[in-house]
Amino acid sequence: MLKRLAGVLILVSLLAGGPLYMWGFGGIDIHGDWRSADRSSMGLAPDPSRTQEAVVQVYSARAFNWRGIFAVHAWVATKPEGAASYTLHQVTGWGRPALSSRRGTPDRAWFGSSPTLHATLCGSTAERAIARIETLLPDYPYRDRYRAWPGPNSNTFVAWLIREVPELDVALPSSAIGKDYLAEGVFAPTPSGTGVQFSLAGVLGAAIGWREGVELNLAGLVVGLEPAALGVKLPGVGTLGLLSSAHGLGTEQCPPPRGRMSLAHVPVG
């Protein structure tokens, strides 16, 4: 009995500890106003006015307001060869359809939260990925649906796209709640394609993969191990590791970012 009670207490501590840490020390503004929140460029994307090559990037940032204690919001940015602006592909809860593809600044803060760049493709690799992405967008099964928990949401969309585009060998952070909401069935490759996962509507599941490591999903909160980073995965926090597991993608080198991008460079429409 005492062993069971100790096990339950450890599990509850793991599930609650991460969000409590983010609430107290994660810099999350739970009283923020979206109208005045920072939406400036963070200088992570190649300047489209100076970059001829095609570019694809995958980002995430802490969700707005109290949701940021638990999860991140993910999106994909594309720029075909010769294009003067980026197109942002993402799912939001306020648009109809929920899935939108609009010109914009790829590396803008997400209503006060600085974005994390997970992957960049350039050149011919990016061109192949863009062609595939543009073909796939009409087939996304939840174009008109959004549900913050357990999905389908922004992370469901990006995880689905990563599974369908071979060039995107990306592992979303474990704090991307909704990434485990599967479009069909209960078994699927992990988003990076380097492992397998089991999921019951994103509420209960598990995954093991070379890029994802080992994950246990309980009510959308993920605990696990990430060997590549020599780290552990905690709900809300993501990975705490001794090494960085981030990596660039593609065989062609991208031009370096040119500092914070002016909105004049990327028209919003």
Image (tube, grey):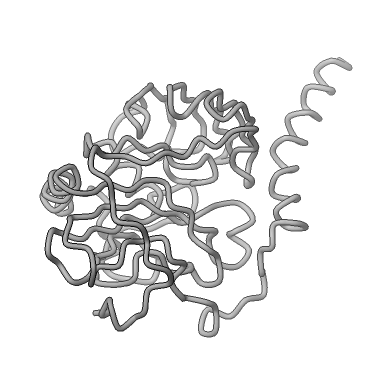
Quarter of image, res 88: bottom left
Q: Nearer the viewer, residue 153 or 25?
A: 25
Quarter of image, res 170: top left
The residue located at (43%, 30%) in the rendering is 199
Query: Please, is residue 152 above or below residue 208 in the view?
Result: below
Position of residue 197 in the picture relative to residue 124 (left or right): right
Query: Please, is residue 31 above or below residue 176 in the view?
Result: below
The residue located at (32%, 60%) in the rendering is 90
Residue 18, image x, y percentages: 70, 44
Residue 136, image x, y percentages: 15, 48
Position of residue 11 in the picture relative to residue 5 (left or right): left
User: Which image quarter is the C terminus in?
Assistant: bottom left
Q: Nearer the viewer, residue 121 or 70?
A: 121
Q: Nearer the viewer, residue 147 or 135?
A: 135
Count up the numbered dots: 0
The residue located at (50%, 58%) in the rendering is 61
Residue found at the far right of this picture? 2
Residue 224, image x, y percentages: 60, 28
